[in-house]
Image (cartoon, helix red, strand yellow):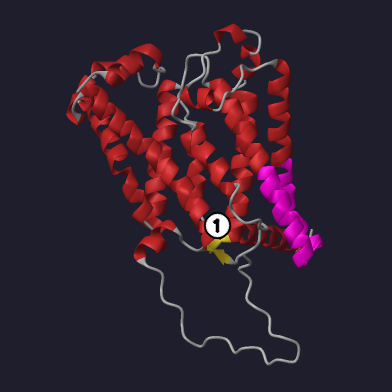
Amino acid sequence: MSLAPAQPADGATPAAPDPRPRPAPRPLTRLLLPAVPLARVAWLRAALSVFACVDALLLTDHVLQHTRVAGFWAPGALARALHVPAPTPLLAAAALAVLVGGTLVLLVLPLAGRRAPGPAAGARRARASRAAATAAAAAYLLWLLWSTGFGYVGHDHLAVFVAEVVLATAPAAGYTDQRPSRAAGWAVRTVQLATVATYFGSAVSKWVRSGTPWGWANGAVFVWAVLRRGSPLVQWTLQVPGLLVVGQWVLLSMELLSPLVLLLRGRRLALTVAGFLAFHLVTFLALGIHFLPTVVCWLAFAPLERLPAALATARASRRAGAAVTASRPA
């Protein structure tokens, strides 16, 4: 059944638009289906698709080595449910090619709207975007299932994989398309929820495994981490174990309170996101743990649709500065 409005018969007077204002969306609708500019989805989809390629080529490239030891393939529950076969050189190369190819299409399509405007061209771009995003998401899922099918399952890829899937459902958009869309808002909000769930789920896991929250927070987890892989920057903390316990309480509190990020706006949101990113920077410098697949998903909280205007302003400032410099007498 078509959802397009009915067209008047030939010669008939078209119906006047309904003058009554539309009711304001309910609070739950505004929370889960915010209207965000389509450009935000275009930028977020491009950034996370590029990261998926970087992840496959640099961070989880062990999949390529695992193709030579397929006998150790021990698929997890999802891989078994999907009947995922063990990786082979041919399958791994094909998945990588689909992932990179789909990403290149997603990067170029938002630029095509300026050269080929019109509804017909727009429909073709929408179909191409959906096909490329779906193919890239499927290839990335397959790659991640191979990555976690040889004895190690990390939780840092939850948000970025969810992002790949839900952004495939978002409308096609250009990098400068400022039209608001609740479909785009749903995709962005889902990425945000998955990002927050990574932290909150980590806190719940600590609680379950330790019996009580304070059981984990008062333990010696950070001492063990510093002893095992601490950098010279943090070796001194072993002489002040109480400071490490305070750090454990801070981390657990951040994780338990992470869902509140979804309610923040403006400067408070920016400061909170900066706090989480600072935590990851400290973790990397102290222990060499980066959690990049989760870190990049914090982009879902950023007003990425403002990038074109910011870049244009920066270019104009550079031109103005160059003109002033050229006008000065030698």
What residue range appears in magenta?
104-133
- Whether 152 is drawn above or below 9: the answer is above
The quarter of the image holding the N terminus is bottom right
- Whether 185 is drawn above or below 200: the answer is below
Location of residue 173 in the rendering, given as x and y in whole percent from the top left corner: 66, 58
- Mark 1, Cα crowd under 10 Å, few <14 / some 14-19 / many 20+, is many
Closer-to-camera residue (232/192): 192
Is there any visible trace of residue 243 in the rendered image? no
Disc 1: which residue: 184
To which quarter of the image does residue 17 belong?
A: bottom right
- Residue 116 in magenta stretch: yes
To which quarter of the image does residue 38 belong?
A: bottom right
To which quarter of the image does residue 47 belong?
A: top right
The residue that appears at 62% across and 21% down in the rendered structure is 61
- Residue 248 in magenta stretch: no
The three-letter amino acid code for the residue at tag 1 is Ala
Location of residue 230 in the rendering, given as x and y in whole percent from the top left corner: 39, 17
The residue that appears at 69% across and 45% down in the rendered structure is 131
The quarter of the image holding the C terminus is bottom right
Location of residue 294 in the rendering, given as x and y in whole percent from the top left corner: 47, 36
**Element type at marker 1?**
helix
Location of residue 156 in the rendering, given as x and y in whole percent from the top left corner: 46, 30
